[in-house]
Image (cartoon, grey):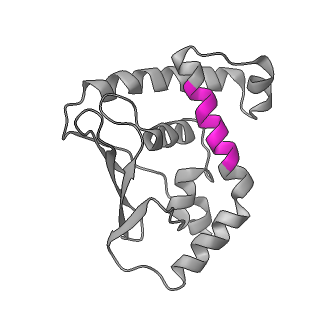
Amino acid sequence: MTFRRMADRRPVETLVERSDGVVFGMRGAGGGAELPHDLVHALVESQLAVPDGIWGCVADGVVWGSMRHVSGRRPPHAAERSDRLKRERAARIQWAEGLADLVGRLARGGEVLPHELTGAGVGTARLTAAAEELRNADRRWAALRPGEDWVVTWPVSRTRRR
């Protein structure tokens, strides 16, 4: 995933190249110096080893509505596979959304209730470490100039290796 920092208040441009060679482009939330929402997901899911969150699903063949095909040959029945994975993993995707939100609030020093920490399914120490990583990432992203990139490599999916 290549996240391109755009000028202030312009949506982030992200290039997603899957392991099968298919490339997608995305415009995402978070403009200027604000850490992009999709990058937050990539960092949190990677840090907390979430294989079936937003980006794990993309690695396995899910295509979200915000993604547009750029290049590479799509596998046969790709749309059907994407739809099936979205249905099968709906609960895990929702959990990953909540987890990214929770770590983001921790990183910003926002209010986090004790039951949110215990109910996250991840130890408090790991959540705290992920929040610290997100604070560091926020500073790193803000230091990028418009047009500069941040590249994130997602691990090969467990599902695809089966």
* 17 on left or right of 156: left
Magenta: main secondary structure: helix
Q: Where does residue 12 sit, x and y in percent of width and height?
A: 33, 44
* 141 on left or right of 37: left
Magenta span: 94-104
Q: Residue furthest front?
A: 9
Q: Residue at x 56, y 55 (%)?
A: 56
* 127 on left or right of 107: right
Question: In the displayed structure, would residue 84 be above or below residue 112?
Answer: below
Q: Residue at x 54, y 84 (%)?
A: 77
Q: Tell me the quarter of the picture where residue 57 sits.
A: bottom right
Q: Residue at x 74, y 24 (%)?
A: 117
Count of marks, rendered view: 0
Asked whether residue 16 is in view, the answer is yes
Asked whether residue 18 is in view, the answer is no
Q: For this rendering, which residue is in front, 106 or 126?
A: 106
Q: Where does residue 129 sit, x and y in percent of width and height?
A: 57, 22
Q: Tell me the quarter of the picture where residue 112 sits.
A: top right
Point out the image quarter for the C terminus. Answer: bottom right
Question: In the displayed structure, would residue 1 be above or below residue 103?
Answer: below
Q: Where does residue 135 sit, x and y in percent of width and height?
A: 45, 21
Q: Tell me the quarter of the picture where residue 83 sits.
A: bottom right
Q: Where does residue 55 sit, x and y in percent of width and height?
A: 52, 52
Q: Residue at x 47, y 39 (%)?
A: 37
